[in-house]
Amino acid sequence: MATRLPPRFVRIGVSGTITGVGLGLAALLIAQLFAGFATPLGLFFGGVFPLALATAVAAAGLLIWRCGLTAEQSVHVGFWWAIGTGVSTVTGFALVIFEASGGVTLADPEIIVVGNSASGGLGGLIVGWYDARRLALAAERERERQQLADEREKLALINRIVRHDIGNDLQVIAGTADALERYVDDDGAEPLERLQRTTSEAIDITERLRTFVSALEDDEADLRPIALQQVLTTQVENLRDRYPAATVSLSEPVPDVAVQADELLATVLHNLLSNAVTHNDSDDPRVIVTVETDPGIVTIRVADDGPGIPDPQRGSLFERGELGPDSNGSGIGLYIVDQLIERYDGSISVEDSDIGGTAFEIELPRPAGD
């Protein structure tokens, strides 16, 4: 039912035809009203009720013009209206012929045909409207599919930039910094060490970002049982190495359980642990990590004694580009965390910690049979 005509012209054509037929049917019924009916019941069912149906058809035609349907949707509505009107009109003539052949006249033949046409047309319009809605939903899904394809192309471009351009440049910086060690005296040792550490962290971040982008390019998450104890312990030890002044407490022993996730679980824990320290304005930040297990669920809680996060900001904290209070970051860390946890069918929440700062609590599903 595709058409090359402009949507406006198609709408006007379909709308004008339906409205014109509806008005014509209404005019015939009004003439019957003036002719009179023998009983009040006949007046209602033979005049008022069919007239209301015909008027509804005419009004529906006007709505088609006003509601901004596409050309294809308008044609579909018109098609079903024509089917409903045609079938009902033929049925009306069949009833008239049946009456005539039996010698019985229950109602005026004109009222039977006109009333059937109006009711059938209105039914066809209802079916056509739902058919048009179906087309609209299909078009919306197609737009979303195309948008998703465009986003994937952008992700692929970002992936190439991160992997080849930025990653290679960082490797050069790291290699150059290592080569400078033999030429730097004691006064420059600390700045050089800071450069090496920062470069190493940047390389780690780009690698995690590359992995994250690659994961988003997949249609389905490749989830599997991940041993939480090893991943969490490693990330806590890395945090202690990067921030010697911080006190990082980990509940011992960490339960030897698995969660349904992938290799990017380390990125989730890395971001939450790093945020607990980097956004803390204390000289000796304190972080407490606890793990609780329940049937089917593992809960990981990362609490700090930092400045906290105001309640109004918590609702948008996981949106892309959203920065926390006094944050100098990119605003992408917690967005990645939220996306990955959603990927794992888990959940994350923010609340006040027992030690005066903020606590992030994530719940992750355990593998079946764990």
Image (cartoon, rainbow, N blue to C red):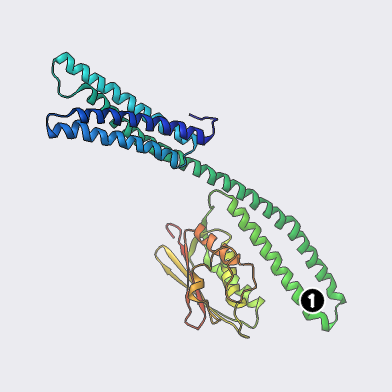
Left or right: residue 180 compared with residue 49? right
Find the residue positioned furthest to the front.
Answer: 34
Residue at the disc numbered 1? 192
Quadrant containing the C terminus is bottom left
Q: Position of residue 214 (x, y in %)?
A: 62, 53
Name the side, left or right, on which 219 lies relative to 137: right
Q: Residue furthest bottom?
A: 283
Res 240 seen here: yes
Q: Is residue 254 visible?
A: no
Secondary structure category for the residue under label 1: helix
Q: Amino acid at mark 1?
A: Leu
Judge by depth and name the residue closer to the eye, 254 or 63: 63
* Residue positioned 82% across, 80% down in the render: 188
Residue drawn where x is 69% and y is 69% of the image:
201
| Rendered residue at 50%/59% (across/down) | 342
**Residue 184 in the image: above or below residue 165:** below
Quarter location, residue 78: top left
Q: Is residue 138 left or right of residue 148?
A: left
Where is residue 183? Give x, y as percent: 87, 76
